[in-house]
């Protein structure tokens, strides 16, 4: 059966545990609004995840409920991370999976930053 609507935030998800320091991550950036760390299964030479510090399930949840300061702080952090990783000259892709059709696995909003090689098709062919 297809899941519809937004689930409640589950504070046992893996990124919540990383935010609480319960499990380690390879951190690349942290500020008041965001934490960025290397993806454990990198898809590109550079593959970093940027997550907001607040408890948002997905982009849908974040865009609806986050404060202006959280939204601005988070997106500025994404840009800063890409800049600090040296990706601006060659380019990069940002991507966020949302819900079932988006292929979201971890229910804490996150943006993937892919770079270090040409990342190919924008969206793969239908499965
Ligand atoms: P998504 O499918 O957009 O929800 O992506 C979740 C991402 O989290 C995947 O790319 C995983 O490789 C990554 N991931 C899962 N657990 C960890 C972890 N402990 N540390 C870093 N990345 C993780």
Image: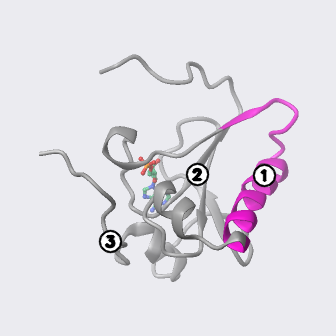
Relative to 114, is 22 above or below? below
Residue 126 image offset from top left, x and y in percent? 34, 19
Please rate how many residues cluster around mark 2, counting C-alpha atoms within 10 Å: few if below 14, some from 14 to 19, many from 20: many
Are the residues at dot 3 and dot 2 in contact (C-beta closer than 8 Å)? no
Residue 7 image offset from top left, x and y in percent? 30, 65
Q: According to the image, label 2 marks what residue?
A: 111
Q: Check residue 8 in the rendering and tell me which mark sits there, or answer none.
A: 3
Residue 92 image offset from top left, x and y in percent? 72, 35
Relative to 110, is 121 above or below? above
Residue 97 image offset from top left, x and y in percent? 46, 45
Q: Which element is circle 3 on?
A: loop
Q: Check residue 79 in the rendering and tell me which mark sits there, or answer none.
A: 1
How many numbered dots are placed on residues in this image?
3
Are the residues at dot 2 and dot 1 in contact (C-beta closer than 8 Å)? no
**Residue 16 lies in quadrant:** bottom left
Please rate how many residues cluster around mark 1, counting C-alpha atoms within 10 Å: few if below 14, some from 14 to 19, many from 20: some
The mark lying in front, picked from 3 and 1, is 3
- Residue drawn at point x = 40 percent, y = 40 percent: 102
**Residue 100 lies in quadrant:** top left
- Which segment is the magenta one? 69-93
Image side of residue 95 versus residue 22, left or right:
right
Quadrant, the C terminus: top left
């Amino acid at each position: 059966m297809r899941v519809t609507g937004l689930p409640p935030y589950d504070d046992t998800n893996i990124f919540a545990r990383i935010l609480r320091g319960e499990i380690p991550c390879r951190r690349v950036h942290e500020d008041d609004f965001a934490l960025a760390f290397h993806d454990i299964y990198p898809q590109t030479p550079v593959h970093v995840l940027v997550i907001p510090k607040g408890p948002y399930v997905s982009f849908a949840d974040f865009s609806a409920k986050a404060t202006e300061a959280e939204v601005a702080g988070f997106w500025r952090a994404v840009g800063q991370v890409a800049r600090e990783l040296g990706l601006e000259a060659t380019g990069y892709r940002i991507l966020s999976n949302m819900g079932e059709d988006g292929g979201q696995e971890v229910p804490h909003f996150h943006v993937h930053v892919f770079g270090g090689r040409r990342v190919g098709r924008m969206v793969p062919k239908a499965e």
